Amino acid sequence: MPLPVKDSAPVERQLLRDVVYNRLYEGILDGTLEPGETLLDEKLTAWLGVSRTPIREALMKLADIGLVEMAPNRYTRVAPIDLRAIDEAIYTAGLLHEYAARTSVPNLDAAALSRLDKALKEIRKAAKANNLPALGSAVNDFFLEFERSSGNDVLLAISEGLSPQVLRYVSVWKLPFGTDELPARVTEIHEAAKAHDGAKAGDLVRALYAPALAQFLSDYRRTDADIEESPVV
Amino acid sequence: MPVPIAEAVSPRRLIRDEVFVRLLDAIVDGDLTPGEQLYDAEIEKWVGVSRTPVREALNQLAAMGLVEIMPQKRTRVTPIDPDRLRDLIETVGSLVTGIVRDATPLLTEDDKAALREFTERMGDGDNMAELVRERVLTDGFINVFVRRLDNRTLAKLFTRHLPEVRRALIAAPSSQAFVKGAPHLAAAVDAAVAGNGAKAAKAVADFWNKGLVTVVDEFAPIGKEGR
């Protein structure tokens, strides 16, 4: 019998890997899997009921976005909470959101505006209930709307890639983002978006994220001698 | 016993990195051309390693967008897609503009000297492929600002995405993207040296949007079958 040319196996494997990835991703972000916890292949195999290959693939993907740390032949673990990395990611996400706001806001359509409106309502609700995980994810969702509306797939992909670190922020929630004033600050940005004022929306996003940079510079930036000669390789 | 924090460097990791760097350089420099098929066996022979590190390196390159893996069918160097290239250059440009704005107030005298030297090296931007091969923009300009900001997440993003930009700049038939951008880049360096972050950022945005991004026009759109 001739072998079928199209095989479905890789597709299924791909899906399985994604299922495993999503379970682990959510487990790490909601704290089911604790920061620093060792991830043993056999335990994950038993927990998720799948073989080793999709688990290894999912773990490599999670390592890539900084949620898992792998040291070959030594350990695989949930990345410990790294305040410096979180602060770096928030600053970087701020730059991308600011750019996305400046370029997309002038052309936002009604559907995008209504999604922003919905996200803003979620922000208000979560802030009122003091539900920090919900607040973090609603704020992230609000800003990603600018990237989604930009039509720039790379911009969206890179911003989404920063989301896990940004979302881990909620587990250590502290200033510069006070939970009380956040809904009002985002409302201002929403008003600028409704007025299609990209410059104003961009300036407001920048102002909102500015404390992340100030904090990074005062708490984490190393002295000249300690910084790698060429950080971009 | 507490788990040690330090990153382990195993020999296996090093072999993978060796294959990765060899392939990366070959793709960026154009020795492996856009769309070219890659065969595991040939790479194994070329670099002299086994299949596993080769696959790992290819997966890493695929995550960067430089290689396309279609499971059990083919693996090839990703063709240059002008639409994606535009998105990529604009996104990287927004990050460069942001760090120039924010890192300019932090520049040291050594940084400023390095930037002046960079302007000399860039000249009128002619000979773009050679300048990019020698990493003049990456090391002489972008690295100065990234280093001063000391943000490793940003450094990682540039490390990951600049190779695809560099590949296109090297593959482009002409140097016009650099030639158009060079005056703006010189203005950016002048403003940065003078400590004016806003002005430097504006000039870098001009370099990017009026110069660099025009490299996209040098590549023909690829048809559906090419994707």
Image (spheres, coloured by chain):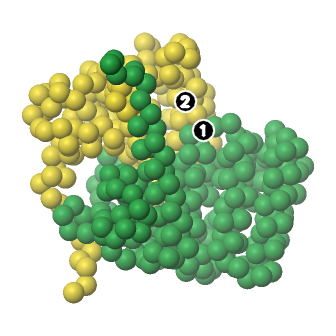
Chain colours: A green, B yellow
Residue shown at 44% from the left, 50% from the top: A17
Instruction: Name which residue lies at 31% across and 46% down.
Output: A233
Residue A224 or residue A6, whichever sits in front: A6
Is A45 or A93 nearer to us in this picture? A45
Q: Is residue A107 visible?
A: yes
Determine the residue positioned at 68% across, 53% down: A144
Q: Is residue A179 left or right of residue B148?
A: right
- In the picture, the disc for residue B84 is 2
Question: Which amino acid type is shown beneath numbered disc 2?
Answer: Arg
SS for dot 2:
helix
| Res. A179 image quadrant | bottom right
Relative to A72, say whether B47 is above or below.
Answer: above
x, y percentage for residue A25? Answer: 50, 63
Q: Answer whether labels 2 and 1 touch (C-beta < 8 Å).
A: yes
- Residue B112 visible in this rendered orientation of the protein: no
Binning the other alpha carbons within 10 Å of mark 1 as few (below 14), some (14 to 19) or many (20 upward) gives some
Gap between marks 2 and 1 measured at Cα: 8 Å
Q: In the image, residue B204 lies at what x, y percent?
A: 56, 39
Read off the residue under disc 1. Answer: A153
